[in-house]
Image (spheres, rainbow, N blue to C red):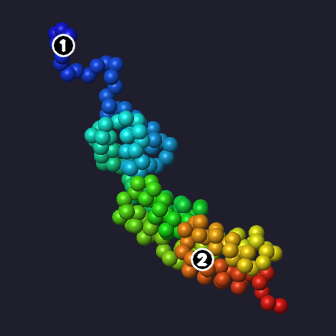
Amino acid sequence: MGAPAEGTDTQQDDQPDPHEVARFIVLRQLTVGARTRAQLAAKLAQRGCPDDVADTVLDRMTEVGLIDDAAYARALVASKHQTKGLSRRALAHELRSRGVEPEVGQDALADLSQEQERGRARELVDKRLASLYGLPPPVQVRRLAGMLARKGYPGDLAMAVIREAMAQAREHERD
């Protein structure tokens, strides 16, 4: 048993296995936080990983449950709706931008009811309305509508919630 003949296809000791490199990149990304398959594929492409190697590694990570776009989408919807007050429309955009498939995103958004969305909009308005005390009503309406618009709420819902909140605010009660 001697050294391999010249010209044979053997793995060079100084060349790392591309599958191992890809696995390492994916696992490192996942230790930082959950990622979608599309985000991980983009990271592998950025690092020069061949497409076939990336697909093999990502398929295996999905198979063992380390990549789960549906769970990621549900968690993102619940978190961003509660912490940032984002609407269904803004959440759908957020999911698309992270590479979540449209059907998976719609399933995750189905968990968020219209009543929950309206309730969260009202919470946001109530909280912000307190800081607008003393400003003329048109200014309050404009600022509240702008805040809800930036969070993706439709205009009709925003105006209904704002009118309701202002009608119930002590500042706007008639003497």
Secondary structure, mark 2, is helix
- What's the distance in space between the residues labelled 2 and 1, CA to CA? 73 Å
- Residue 12 in percent (x, y) is at 28, 19
- Residue 11 in percent (x, y) is at 26, 22
Report the amino acid beneath label 1.
Answer: Glu
Instruction: Give the total of numbered labels.
Output: 2
Identify the residue shown where x is 72% and y is 75%: 140
Identify the residue shown where x is 45% and y is 38%: 28
Answer with mark 2 or mark 1, whichever residue precedes in sequence.
1
- Residue 175 in percent (x, y) is at 83, 91
Residue beneath disc 2:
158
Q: Is residue 169 left or right of residue 112?
A: right
Could you say which disc has been placed on residue 6 in the image? 1
The residue most toward the top is: 2
Q: Is residue 10 left or right of residue 91?
A: left
- Residue 123 in view, yes or no: no
